[in-house]
Amino acid sequence: MKTGFINIPPNYEQVLTEDGSYTLYSKKYDENCHSTSGADGETEKYFLIDSHLNHDLKTSQTIFETGFGIGKSFLAVKKSCEQSKNKIHFISTEIDPNLVIWFFKEYFNLQKLSQDIIEHDFEYIKITILIGDATETTKAYFQDKELKVDKVFQDAFSPKKNPTLWTKSWFEILKSISNETVTLTTYSASHSIRKNLEDAGWKIENLKGFGKKRSATRATLI
């Protein structure tokens, strides 16, 4: 996207990044939702390329995202699956309902949305957004479902700003909802985060980072 947003949700500010795409700055977390090196470029690198999603879209996939944010990952996946014509279920978490309401109005002119679980079917992709504390909503959503995740996009605000979603216990939750062939990708490459992943049963691979970041992380279970 090369133009700015039509409206800005409460408690956010618009930020132009170096690749010409826009992100938002969260006043609550005092952090941008994406790298200033490029919001679109970062999304493509970590969640389409590093996850091997573009290749794996040859088959149907279930994707779980930690932190819906402004929806860039969903939009990127939606575009890819429309080209592949394979059905995708995209599940995400978000603590700020106003941000999700803004997203659907901004991009799809959808006005009436529930407050707990937001779901909508597009032609090739179904989106489910769990509103609230991700550690609670994720367990509740998957509890009675025969549903396992193929890709995890770990895209919460940074461990410094949002530590709850980078703990060993959180990565254990992600493991419990995933297929054994799952791939997890994230922009974080800190030693403590990788240790938490390993302690939760994930195997770590070091990747090149995006923009000014030297490294990123891919994790698997087998």
Image (cartoon, rainbow, N blue to C red):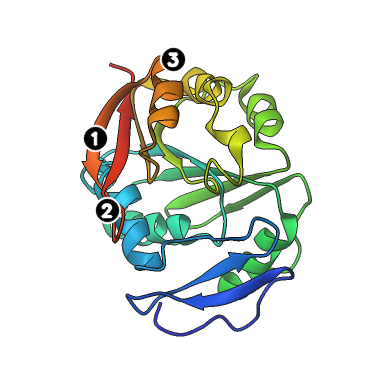
Circle 2: element type: helix
- Quadrant holding the N terminus: bottom left
The amino acid type, in three-letter code, at marker 2 is Ser
Q: Position of residue 103 (x, y in %)?
A: 61, 66
| Residue depicted at 74% across the width and 70% down the height | 10
The part of the image, by quadrant, that contains residue 145 is top right
CB atoms of marks 2 and 3 within 8 Å: no
Regarding residue 123, the answer to whether it shows in the image is: no
The part of the image, by quadrant, that contains residue 132 is top right
Which residue is labeled 3 in the image? Answer: 199
- Quadrant holding the C terminus: top left
- C-alpha span from label 3 to label 1: 17 Å
Comparing 194 with 62, the one in front is 194
Q: Please state if 84 lies on the left or on the right of 133 as rendered.
A: left
Compare marks 2 and 3 and give the one earlier in the sequence. 2
Is the residue marked by circle 3 packed among few (<14), some (14-19), or many (20+) residues within 10 Å? some
